[in-house]
């Protein structure tokens, strides 16, 4: 079903899943400004992507959370169209179905994502941290929750995370149609023995337990790879998350740090990576070492900022899909900042209302002052752009509705 019907033309098109994160709109803007035809596909008619002036066609598809196979079939139907050149993954569900059913897609479009077994090396955090250790990349102490060698009486602060970044039939015992986002991270107090069976049952699998790193010094390394070869990279430092404890990026600054580059490239080289990757690191406050947290094998929510800094990854992705990698120019500006305004509001809300174990909130007056000062000094915004304002207002409307319905 099409919200906005557009006849197929001879021009090549890219399919972009429409989600609540700004990455979808960033892809539409980057490609649309260059005359590349864009197709936004979403289960949500209120997605900001459908509001963009650079959305040439809006298509309603099943939600991957309701029926993952039906979602795959909808993407495959779009891939079979003669005008569609590639599909751009913007969330875990996207890259999971594209890799899981890669053979079905590669008959029709450029498949700029890893083989499923390689994807599993990233979406399975146990395998990911093993790869990181093999690559010489720093990692926090990480074990399965039911590991008999864990000394729970040790005065160590732990966090419990899902082992898998998505709970699909490739990783856990479930039907192919099922796709469940993993439960949120929880904190374990020092010296307490957790109820392993209860936690595992709640999470739907045996999760991992990881040493808590008391730092908010978070960095992102971003890359596009072509069968083991890096084509473009970017780095940023997260200055504020949606929560005072961290989370997705509300305010970040571009950086260029050789040690961060070395860690990111070493890990992706070890994985023989293909496609997109965002690697999250925390910097150890005592040693300065970058320690791996996770890899997101798709476009990241702060993508609009990468583009504004000069690292136009959606266009690079398109150039790779069309065999024009010689035209990729991946220079970017360091030491500039950008914001997701919704994220800044959520950050301030968290300072007022949230209680997060192991992390003390700042004074609200200090938090408000920091936000205001950074907005003044770095007036770059993920959704708010003068030539395409409707996605910003749609996002604000959606945010208001979410708060109202709480």
Image: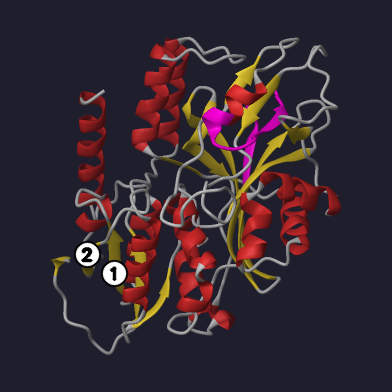
Going by the image, does 251 lie left or right of 353?
right
Tell me residue 217's x, y (percent).
65, 31
In the displayed structure, would residue 346 be above or below residue 60?
A: above
Q: Residue at x 30, y 86 (%)?
A: 11
Q: Sequence order check: which comes first, mark 1 or mark 2? A: 1
Q: Quadrant of residue 194?
A: top right
Q: Residue at x 56, y 72 (%)?
A: 329
Does the stretch in magenta take in 37?
Answer: no
In the displayed structure, would residue 8 be above or below residue 400?
A: below
Tell me residue 117's x, y (percent).
66, 63
Q: Which residue is under mark 2? A: 58
In the displayed structure, would residue 303 be above or below residue 232?
A: above
Tell me residue 284's x, y (percent).
76, 31
Does the stretch in magenta take in 217?
Answer: yes
Q: Residue at x 60, y 44 (%)?
A: 164
- For residue 91, say whether it is visible: no
Q: Quadrant of residue 41?
A: bottom left
Q: Which residue is under mark 1? A: 39
Q: Which residues are magenta?
A: 201-221
Tell me, yes or no, whether the two marked residues, 1 and 2, touch with CB atoms within 8 Å: yes
Q: Residue at x 57, y 80 (%)?
A: 325
Number of callouts in the render? 2
Q: Quadrant of residue 73?
A: bottom left
């Amino acid at each position: 079903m099409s919200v906005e019907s557009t006849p197929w033309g001879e021009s090549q098109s890219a399919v972009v899943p429409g989600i609540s994160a700004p990455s979808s709109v960033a892809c539409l803007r980057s490609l649309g400004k260059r005359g590349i035809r864009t197709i936004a596909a979403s289960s949500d008619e209120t997605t900001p992507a459908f509001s963009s002036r650079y959305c040439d066609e809006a298509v309603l598809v099943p939600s991957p959370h309701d029926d993952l196979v039906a979602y795959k079939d909808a993407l495959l139907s779009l891939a079979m169209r003669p005008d569609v050149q590639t599909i751009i993954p913007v969330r875990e569900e996207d890259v999971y179905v594209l890799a899981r059913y890669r053979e079905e897609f590669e008959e029709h479009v450029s498949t700029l994502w890893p083989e499923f077994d390689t994807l599993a090396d990233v979406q399975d955090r146990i395998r990911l941290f093993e790869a990181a250790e093999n690559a010489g990349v720093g990692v926090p102490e990480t074990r399965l929750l039911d590991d008999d060698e864990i000394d729970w009486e040790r005065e160590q602060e732990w966090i419990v995370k899902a082992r898998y970044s998505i709970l699909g039939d490739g990783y856990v015992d479930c039907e192919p149609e099922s796709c469940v986002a993993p439960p949120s991270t929880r904190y374990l107090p020092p010296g307490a023995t957790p109820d392993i069976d209860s936690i595992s049952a709640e999470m739907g699998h045996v999760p991992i337990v990881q040493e808590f790193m008391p730092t908010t010094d978070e960095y992102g390394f971003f890359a596009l790879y072509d069968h083991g070869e890096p084509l473009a990279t970017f780095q940023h430092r997260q200055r504020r998350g949606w929560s005072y404890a961290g989370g997705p990026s509300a305010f970040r600054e571009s950086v260029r740090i050789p040690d961060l580059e070395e860690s990111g490239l070493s890990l992706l080289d070890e994985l023989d990576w293909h496609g997109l990757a965002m690697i999250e690191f925390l910097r150890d406050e005592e040693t300065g070492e970058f320690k791996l947290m996770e890899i997101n094998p798709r476009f990241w929510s702060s993508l609009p900022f990468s583009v504004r800094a000069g690292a136009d990854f959606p266009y690079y992705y398109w150039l790779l899909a069309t065999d024009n990698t010689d035209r990729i120019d991946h220079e970017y500006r360091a030491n500039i900042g950008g914001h997701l305004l919704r994220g800044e509001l959520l950050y301030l809300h968290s300072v007022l209302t949230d209680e997060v174990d192991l992390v003390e909130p700042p004074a609200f007056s200090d938090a408000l002052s920091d936000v205001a000062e950074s907005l003044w000094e770095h007036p770059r915004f993920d959704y708010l752009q003068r030539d395409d304002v409707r996605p910003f207002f749609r996002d604000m409307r959606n945010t208001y509705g979410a708060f109202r319905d709480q």
